[in-house]
Amino acid sequence: MPNPLRSALRAVVENGVQLVSAFNRRRLPRTDQPFLVGIHAPMRAELTLENLPVTGSIPPGLHGRYLRMGANPVDPDPAARHWFLGDGMVHGVAIENGTAPWYRNRWIRSRLAASALGRPAAPGPRRGRNDTVNTNVVEIGGRPFALVEAGSFPVELSADLEQQRYNPFDGTLGGSFTGHPHRDPLTGEHHAVAYDGNVWDAVRHVVVSDAGRVVRDVPVAVEHGPCIHDCAFTARFAVVLDLPVTFSMRAVLAGHEFPFRWNPSHRARVGLLPRRGEDADVIWCEVEPCFVFHVANAFDDGDGPVVLDVVAYPTMFATDGSGLDALGRLERWTIDPTTRRVDRRVLDATPQEFPRIDERRFGRRHRYAYTVAVPPDGNTQLRGASRLYKHDLETGHRAVHEFGDDRVPGEFVFVPAHGEAGEDEGWLLGLVIDTANDSTELAILDARRFEAAPVATIRLPHRIPPGFHGNWFPAARPEP
Ligand SMILES: [Fe+2]
């Protein structure tokens, strides 16, 4: 039962914090925000383009939509803007019978974005004041949902992106969600580790059924309000990354919108939660302090260790929280649930991000992982980040797809060529910015001829700023 006195006190404290934060936000230096200029300059309009020009030959098996999310503030505040924040925008390209019939981009109409646009906010229930959704778009229960971590309910999108509605999985989601749920292809369950910006002593293991309803929501005790961007699962465990980027009241009071910072006093650990277990069942394994945004995959090595492939950073948000402190590298962590030891092995020290696999392998041993290059000098305009990598984790071989100078690829998603396709038998789809022409291509690569030119590109006449995550939404589910 809620304690009325405690609730009233909390409301007073929260209001006080907001007043101090708003006052100090006005005093923050009005420096040029690197994530609002050049390649990152937001789009200013919603477009509908039809019959897009195609170069090459779109594989006939591709029938559906590629959707991708990112932050694209309607009315950006250069003093407060953080690259993770800002109104969400979804981009979609439809593919049908070797053609690309349409492209659309639409803002997620949160209350703030809708007000700035002078349009009605999207319908549906809200959770708290902040209803911004900007991180990922994922098929759950056969429907596309725009997702964000730590706050808002998801937003369900219509197939043509024209309709949107805040939808807590048909009323079954009781709290925050994540931008990175992962679907178990064997059970159809989507596993998520969710945290809440206002709850600092627990995170939750949430499971959404293949029909799109929450069927499990179990709290896991933590300290300091850790920021947990991604998760993983194996046949036995959900994997909880409790790493030392945590809620910082100091950052909030100083006026920063992004409230998480590196916290050296937070013990770094990986939790192995039995998939049907409770908080008391978590096997916590300490790991050298570091941070992980994204997991490629995890699996059980027999009934022994858990293997976890991640992009890991030595620190994150240790300074002002506005950019990367250090560069990420691809690592394989071997986690022994008996000894509780975590062995970290560097697979590739080259800066990279956005690891993806053939997601039919989620939770089981995978051979291939695909990543995107990050500029070695960390420049925020992404100059020099013109490559994708394909890692063969059996042989250690790394193949490179070079898009060429002036090209900046985003995350690429693997789409199997057909239901029985081998692990790398299929296509890789992603957006590539042409910085010389301020335009964009949706590129389709043959994953087995990774270094060859794209089999097809779909040309968009405008620049889509670098975003976060996207997925392929087949027009119909493959036959079982
Ligand atoms: Fe992410």
Image: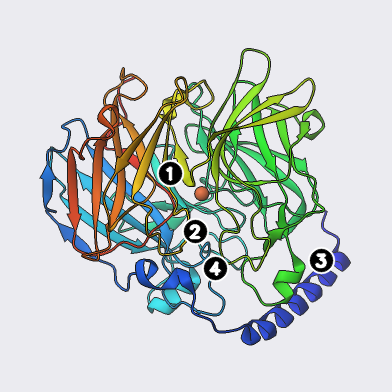
Q: Residues within 10 Å of mark 3 (few under 14, many from 20)?
A: few
Q: Residue at coordinates 31% horizontally, 37% vertically from top-left?
A: 428
- Residue type at the position of mark 3: Ser
Distance from Cα at disc 4 to Cα at disc 3: 30 Å
Q: Which of marks 3 and 4 precedes in the sequence? A: 3
Residue 206 location, x and y as percent? 62, 39
Task: Indicate the secondary structure of the residue bearing disc 1.
Answer: strand
Task: Name the residue beneath numbered marker 3.
Answer: 7
Task: Indicate the secondary structure of the residue bearing disc 2.
Answer: loop
- Residue type at the position of mark 2: Gly
- Residue type at the position of mark 1: Val
Task: Name the residue beneath numbered marker 1.
Answer: 138
State whether residue 365 is above or below residue 406. above
Task: Name the residue beneath numbered marker 4.
Answer: 82
Task: Name the residue beneath numbered marker 2.
Answer: 378
Nearer to me, 25 or 94: 25
